[in-house]
Amino acid sequence: MLNHLTTETRNKRTMNLDQMSIEEFLKVMNEEDAKVAQAIREQIPQIAEAVKRIIKSFKSGGRLIYMGAGTSGRIGLLDAVECPPTFGTNPDEVIGLIAGGERAFIKAVEGAEDSRTLGVQDLQDIKLTKKDAVVGIAASGRTPYVIAGLEYANKIGATSIAVSCNKDSEIGKAAQIAIEVVNGPEVLTGSTRLKAGTAQKLICNMLSTASMIGIGKVYGNLMVDLQLTNEKLVERAKRIVMEATSCDFKTAEEYLKKANDKPKIAIVMLLTGMSYEDAVKRLEKSQGFVRKAVE
């Protein structure tokens, strides 16, 4: 059943993999990895459509939900957990679901990815609604857990998006939007943690980052909604305020304190001369977009 899948075929460049020198193998692997970005470029129209739908979900009060098994599930989880510190989102705005639950992030849970029941149950447990966007991730494109989740999303009326590394995938057929990146065979046959995993990570980066830009989480190329959860991020926030307003370090530090450690509010205060309260109101009126707030 796997013979027709590109992700399962043998790479002719590495048929003698066990006889290659380290340097020879690494060069071939690097050259194969370089093909991933080009393969993704061909799917930009589908990725753009997915982003538009995710933005629509966010603006209507919905969520972005990744779901997958094994490496695919872990990649979705990684992207989800990075959104709160990077974009100031609530933990329940971007969610990562992995077949077998959180324990499967560290150790595989046998049979979980083959369970259609779990795919539906996990979405029911988080109370999926028609406002949400579900991104099903599966390198093979045939994972039952993901297929069932996408089918349930369609039934509820939510947006369904599939990310796979094979053409005409089963999850693509189950989704409203199919992102199918064909990277070619892996250097190690069937090891989809390699090129396929890289492709999935790059696509998740695109989906979340472009969507966050679309809901006002960015000013210029600065992440103005980041959370100051450690010393590094505190210093980064000061630099962001300095870059956005051309103020000095001391002023940035002063206004961050006045803004309750919210870079976005500090920037609006500095650029408009407003008080904290007025800056908050202006941002609310502009739906969180700094550029609109300071015009």
Image (cartoon, grey):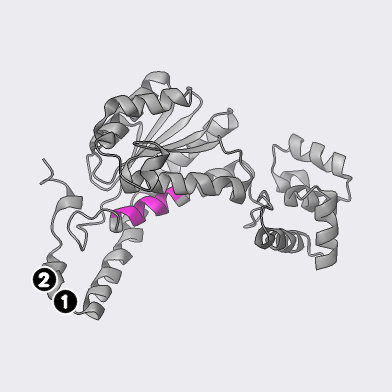
Question: Any mark on residue 20, and which?
Answer: 1
Q: Amino acid at mark 1?
A: Met
Please tell me which residue is depicted at 81% across the width and 61% down the height of the picture. Answer: 252
Residue 45 shows in this picture: no
Q: Nearer the viewer, residue 139 or 18?
A: 18
Q: Determine if the magenta segment contains residue 124.
A: no
In the picture of the structure, the residue carrying the numbered disc 2 is: 16
* Main secondary structure found in the magenta portion: helix
In the picture, the quarter occupied by the N terminus is top left
Please tell me which residue is depicted at 41% across the width and 54% down the height of the picture. Answer: 202
x then y, percent, for residue 28: 24, 72
- Tell me: 102 left or right of 178: right
Please tell me which residue is depicted at 23% across the width and 39% down the height of the picture. Answer: 169
x then y, percent, for residue 2: 13, 44
Instruction: Please rate how many residues cluster around mark 1, counting C-alpha atoms within 10 Å: few if below 14, some from 14 to 19, many from 20.
Output: few
Q: Nearer the viewer, residue 26 or 163?
A: 26
Relative to residue 254, is residue 53 depicted above or below?
Answer: above
Q: Which residues are magenta?
A: 196-204
Q: Quadrant of residue 14?
A: bottom left
